[in-house]
Amino acid sequence: MSLNLSNKEILENTDQEDEVQRFESFEDYGLKEELLRGIFAYGFETPSSIQQRAIQPFLDGRDLIAQSQSGTGKTGTFAISVLQKILPEKRTQVLVVSHTRELSAQIYTVFQNLSKYMDTSLCLLTGGSSVHRNREELKEKPQVLIGTPGRILDMLKNDINYKDINYLVIDEADEMLSRGFVTQIQDIFQFLRSNKLQVGLYSATMPKEFFTITEKFMDRPMKILVKADELTLEGIKQFYVNVERNDFKFDILCDLYDMISASQSIIYCNSKKIVNDLSRRLNDNNFTVATIHGEMPQDERTRIVESFRRGDSRILLSTDLLSRGIDVQQVSIVINYDVPYSIENYIHRIGRSGRFGRKGVAINFVTHIDIGKLHDIMKFYHTNIEELPENFNELI
């Protein structure tokens, strides 16, 4: 497993797109019947682009670097892969590492749903949760551990029986690097250095610096890249509403909700101030609204997301904080109250709807100064965003 490849060699040897066989249906993978039932019960219909390419190489035993934007199905990709590969024995076999508590909790939920008909034990290890409870859970040797680097590292020192861990997944690897988790990831690898380990890295981007960490622990990894123009805007109907001016947006939003029958929706704004102002106005008009932004304490953000996921509110207002990694099953409509500042954030936002083959709708509120940016988005993603028709509710 320990190969002394340089960064340059790894980058060259991982570009193996031509070798990848694509699968158009989940039935084509020869998955366990119980896992297949869980996939369809969770609402996954057809594999996304990254799933078509990245599941089979992992099933074949390859180390894998899978690069694709948020909202394209990376979580489902590695969850299906490892759930297919784990053995029925009650021993810890899989370690999944992500950079935030919210994302770890979301991954846990996906695993929980996909393994609904399987006898699979899971454990969530994140900061802020009870260390004592985690220790008690680990005594039962759960097959899959999911968590954040700090808590996982603490538990590896004394509580995790890591000798049987054969699969390591690192999600949003680029975020791990940018948020200063490099040393902790290296330490986790060190604990597992003697294991027969298969490694999967999943990320929106893959900075070269990350290969410095992984080169000693990956065996000639295969690289799967879903480019921006291949991203799964398929299945998401995209529209725009010409609102002319910012102060017209609220009335148009209220008119829109008079026609929408969707169970839940997410509204994105470009600042905390706009989120708070819009929340107040919607509450004053008897809408049930939840609000989340980056300045909230993490435990409060987690509570709000879980409450929204349970259906306690119909609308979630957010800044771009939520645009990575949080999937809410019932969300079928995303509204960009403000067109995102960054073109790349467009796919992150609207990826909250229409995930994994499910149908979704994205509606963009566009002022006269946003028209140019809307054209840039269409050009960047090779997609078409049409004006919202009067009968759009029939199209949802």
Image (cartoon, rainbow, N blue to C red):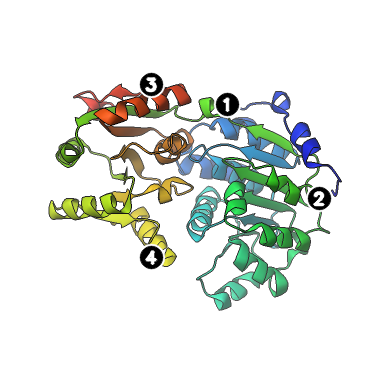
Sequence-first tag of 3 and 4: 4
Residue 110, given in percent of the width and then of the height, sits at 51, 50
Q: Which of 103 and 364 is in front in this view?
A: 364
Q: Residues within 10 Å of mark 4 (few under 14, many from 20)?
A: few
The answer to whether the residue labelled 4 contacts the one labelled 1, judged by CB atoms less than 8 Å apart, is: no
**Residue matched to label 4:** 300
**Residue matched to label 1:** 24
Image quadrant in which the C terminus is located: top left
Determine which of the numbered discs, if any, sits on residue 384 in the image. 3
Determine which of the numbered discs, if any, sits on residue 216 in the image. 2
Quote the CA–CA distance across marks 4 and 1: 40 Å
Q: How crowded is mark 3: few (under 14 residues within 10 Å), some or many (20 or more)?
A: some
Quote the CA–CA distance across marks 3 and 1: 24 Å
Quote the CA–CA distance across marks 3 and 4: 37 Å
Position of 387 compared to 43: left or right? left
SS of the residue under disc 3 = loop
Residue 58, given in percent of the width and then of the height, sits at 70, 40
SS of the residue under disc 1 = loop
